[in-house]
Amino acid sequence: METLMTNQTVSMSEFKRNPAAVLKSANNRPVAVLNHNKPAFYMVQPALFEALLEEMADRDLEALVLSRLAEQDDAVEVDIDTV
């Protein structure tokens, strides 16, 4: 059994018939488009997609910061005026 990541679903046939109506009825929430009762893809508003990308970038940045903090003991102090 697959887990759906949203409460809203629509069949592929219904989505093809009128994607604009599906988008409007979604009220800015994600919609799972089902093909043979299995999720084929999720439809999301551009603002939500951008927020997801920002969250992923933030997590990547956090991992980088944590790895560099772990290497802090190996850092060499430099005077900015002499560089």
Image (tube, grey):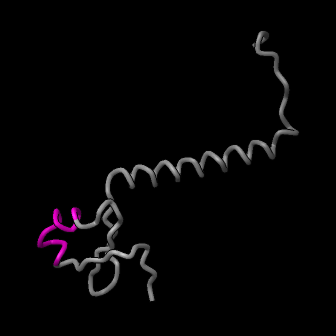
| Residue 51 spot, x, y in % from top left | 44, 51
| Horizontal and vertical percent position of residue 26 | 28, 66
Q: What's the residue at 74%, 47% (across, down)?
A: 67
Specify start and end residues of the magenta stretch as a single range: 14-24
In the foreground, 77 or 62: 62
The quarter in which the N terminus is drawn is bottom left
- Does the segment drawn in magenta span residue 79? no
Relative horizontal placement of residue 76, taking residue 80 as reference (left or right): right
Is 36 rendered above or below residue 41?
below
25 relative to 38, above or below: above
**Camera-nearest residue between 3 and 24:** 24
Which part of the image, by quadrant, shows the C terminus?
top right
Q: Give the farthest residue toward the top.
A: 81
State left or right for residue 64 relative to residue 15.
right
The residue drawn where x is 31% and y is 65% is 43
Looking at the magenta stretch, what is its main secondary structure?
Answer: helix
Q: Is the residue 20 above or below the residue 56 in the image?
A: below
Q: Which residue is drawn at 43% across and 73% down?
A: 5
Residue 32: % across, % down = 33, 73
In x, y percent, where is residue 2?
44, 84
Q: In this view, does 75 lie to the left or right of 53?
A: right
Report whether 80 appears left or right of 43.
right
